[in-house]
Image (cartoon, rainbow, N blue to C red):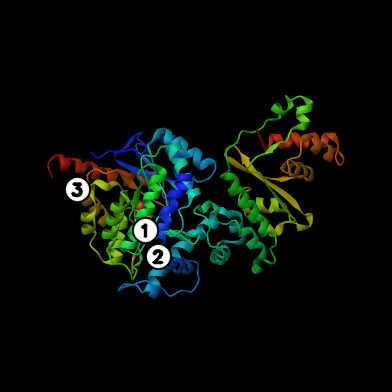
Amino acid sequence: MRPVQNALGMSSLSGVGIGLRATHYQTILNSLPQVPWFEALTDNYMGRGGLPLHHLERVAEHYPITLHGVGLSLGSTDPLNTTYLKKLKQLCERFQPVLVSDHLCWSSVSNVHGHDLFPLPYTERAAKHIGDRIQAVQDFLGHRILVENVSSYLQYKESMQTEAEFLVDVIERADCNLLCDINNIFVSASNHNFDAQEYLELMPVDRVQEMHLAGYEDQGTHLLDTHGAKVHAPVWSLYERALQRFGQVPTLIEWDTNIPEFSVLMAERDKAAAYHADVKHHVASGF
Amino acid sequence: MLMLNTMLLQVFEGMKEKSDSLQQLYNEFMNGVYGQSIYPETFIQGSARLSPQQQFAAYRGSVVGNLSNVLADIFPSVNRCLGKNFFEAMGLRYIDEHPSTSPSLDNYGQAFPTFCDNFTPLKEYPYIGDLARIDWAWHQAFHALDEQVLSLTAIQGLEPEQYLALSLQPSESLHIIDSSYPIFRIWQLTSGSQGHSEHSVTSLNFEEGAECALVWRIGYDVGVASISKIERRFLRLVENRETLGTIFAILLSEYSQTQVMTCFAGLCEKQCFVA
Ligand SMILES: [Fe+2]
């Protein structure tokens, strides 16, 4: 077992959780399903008040919470947005998330925001740049954050490292943890023709604090990470391999577009939980 | 706080030099994302299956698709009123002309009502801007601060002197939308709140004239209502931080005591004021 201790020292996390989405608040609060934890999207709770925060409060009364954001724009060249950081810190104080994460990307420049996960060029200079900024964020929050690998659709001409090499470089420089999105590895591997298993082998085991599972869409020319489908078969295989390498790291079922009924997510969760539990067996039997 | 600023400043100074080329790349990328013509082949490799232009298009498509959905979510009445296709086409124009300037998507769309006012294809539909103002106010009210409502009984418990010297605090969620059109009825027809979709806005009699709409929070719900001239006057005076004494004096020169007191009690009951 690898239960993850709270960044703020309050509770721990284990098993397979589900991404909290507004359409499921009522179902979750009425039926209190057997889910070990929920991941809330930080950026949905940046308002001053209202129903979303109220619902999150109710959910947090029953379940451990993690906060997963898209707004830090860690790779940007703009100054860190202090308003956003302060708000994030307030949310951390209020909801005591076990883990806080954002992405290995940039999403804004010169005060213009794209609200998307744009990749960085994979160079040492860029790794140092984003590493420094992740450190500044961690210093401000007072604890480590997790940085998630993103799906990508392009390669920059100036890239000198592979995505995996770049990610490892950043994690070491920033002294942060890794949110390993298995689907994103598969999507990028397929789009850029690299070996997903080799990628996994490079990841520093003790830094992996969470994994993500989601579905993509095959566009013919490339895979598009829609987070809008069930987990695909090759991603399940890769997940199995990741569990063998990383152990029973807390895992999340993510679904962001065409969000189905909660029961569909629950079925995906149960499937992942079976893989997750199985590893214990392998580990126990000395696999 | 000072320490944080110094610390961040040091980090930024150190990052400045090496980030110059990054910043150039990012600016070029972001310009392209928001529809300016750029040359993706100058910084994107491309693959056997996709050209640099096609690889970049995946990002532009994703950003525009996302912001387009955000506009449809925030402006549901305008979306329903104009129809999905028109709204989407108009949204695309808006997105390229108004790149997002906040890390929070909740802040996106603020300029959309004015954009509707000035959008030439909407010349025959001059009320759309005000309809967008109601949608925007609804969205603002939904995320506004949770507040403690001021009850009429609490006010009535005050001594007359305290009572007249009181400056009421309007709810942070309160928005008044003045319109030259019967905007509340238009909103009713387009918001789906009435459920009679067979009635189109064109069935309204615009001769009936101006309407003023109020948008505000009631608990965690958002209320939208048409308010009378006296209610509007009352709320505007409250917004100007006039005391109850002054508000009564001004309104009593135009309305009867019963009208003024009924208006005041009604606004309290609506939960327009906070403690
Ligand atoms: Fe993810």
Chain of the residue where label 2 is placed in the rendered structure: B
| Tag 1 and tag 2, C-beta contact below 8 Å | yes
Closest to the camera, between mark 2 and mark 3, is 2
For the residues labelled 2 and 3, say whether their Cβ atoms are less than 8 Å apart: no
> What residue would you read off at disc 1?
A129
In the image, what residue occupies the spot 68% across and 30% down? B151
Examine the rendered structure and indicate whether residue A208 appears above or below residue B261: below
Q: Locate residue A50 relative to residue B8 in the image: left or right.
A: right
Chain ID, mark 3: A
- Which of B183/B167 is in front? B167
Q: Residues within 10 Å of mark 2 (few under 14, many from 20)?
A: many
What percent of the width, then of the height, locates residue B192?
60, 50
Mark sitting on residue A244: 3
- Mark 1 belongs to which amino acid? His
The x, y position of residue B244, in whole percent, is 77, 35
Q: Quadrant of residue B26?
A: bottom left
The local secondary structure at tag 3 comes to helix
Mark yes or no: residue A256 visible. Answer: yes
The residue beneath circle 2 is B22
Give the farthest residue toward the right. B253
The percent position of residue A208, horizontal first and vertical second, equals: 27, 47
